């Protein structure tokens, strides 16, 4: 005989109200202002261009008028991952705490948009820092036979900048 139930059943769900973060002011290392809409629209083909120095380092800072608590971010840095290779750069989120930049999270640079959660951090300034990937793995699958001329069809030209197509800090639990 199939199971049977009787009586009243209720399912209660209470959504957690998460406050929206106020609008941040975004600036690059050279103090050039970035339009917030270029980092939060659905267009992943255009965003903020972070200029890299000779060591492949660069940054973008998000500043708020008051301290905010951040628990997650959404990030897209397209074009850095090529077939059979790791990204030539890595990304880190940092927060200015007591006047010093402190690392919040290592962020993987992938070929798709990613949402990353981390322990809550309260600060007025957050920095997306780009730096050379120290763990880069050079491809060996395409070296060819001894004496053959190898053609690297997936090579990236010399990096002088990266484009951040999506960068959104969030206060909600993920």
Image (cartoon, rainbow, N blue to C red):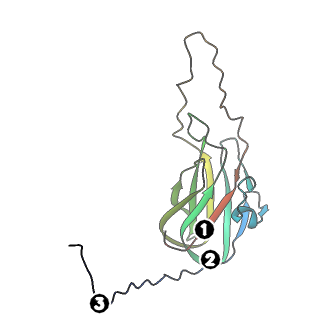
In the depicted structure, whether residue 89 falls above or below residue 40:
above
Label 1: how many Cα within 10 Å (few below 14, some 14–19, many 20+): many
Closest to the observer: 3 or 131? 3
**Which mark, residue 169?**
1
Q: Position of residue 39 (x, y in %)?
A: 71, 62
- Nearer the viewer's eye, disc 3 or disc 2? 3
Pointers 2 and 1 in contact (C-beta within 8 Å):
yes
Pointers 1 and 3 in contact (C-beta within 8 Å):
no
Name the residue carrying label 3: 7
Name the residue carrying label 2: 21
Q: Position of residue 128 (x, y in %)?
A: 62, 58
Closest to the observer: 127 or 110? 110
- Nearer the viewer's eye, disc 1 or disc 3? 3
**Which mark, residue 128?**
none
Quick one: which residue is furthest to the front in this view? 1
Which residue is at 56% across, 33% downward? Answer: 84
Quarter holding residue 129: bottom right
- Going from N to C along the chain, the mark reached first, 3 or 2, is 3
Which residue is at 61% across, 78% downward? Answer: 20
Quarter holding residue 160: top right
- Going from N to C along the chain, the mark reached first, 2 or 1, is 2
Disc 2/disc 1 C-alpha distance (Å) = 8 Å
Q: Position of residue 43 (x, y in %)?
A: 73, 58
Q: Position of residue 92 (x, y in %)?
A: 56, 55
């Amino acid at each position: 005989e199939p199971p049977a139930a009787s009586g009243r059943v209720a399912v209660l769900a209470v959504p957690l109200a998460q406050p929206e973060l106020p609008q941040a002011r975004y600036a690059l290392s050279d103090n050039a202002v970035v339009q917030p809409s270029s980092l939060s629209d659905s267009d992943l083909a255009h965003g903020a261009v972070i200029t890299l120095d000779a060591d492949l380092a660069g940054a973008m800072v998000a500043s708020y008028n008051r301290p905010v608590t951040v628990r997650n971010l959404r990030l897209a840095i397209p074009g850095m991952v090529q077939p059979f290779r790791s990204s030539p750069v890595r990304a880190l989120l940092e927060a200015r705490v007591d006047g010093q930049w402190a690392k919040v999270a290592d962020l993987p640079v992938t070929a798709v948009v990613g949402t990353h959660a981390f322990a809550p951090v309260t600060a007025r300034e957050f920095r997306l820092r780009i730096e050379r990937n120290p763990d880069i793995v050079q491809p060996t699958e395409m070296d060819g036979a001894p004496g053959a001329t190898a053609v690297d069809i997936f090579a990236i030209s010399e990096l002088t900048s990266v484009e951040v197509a999506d960068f959104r800090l969030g206060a909600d639990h993920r």
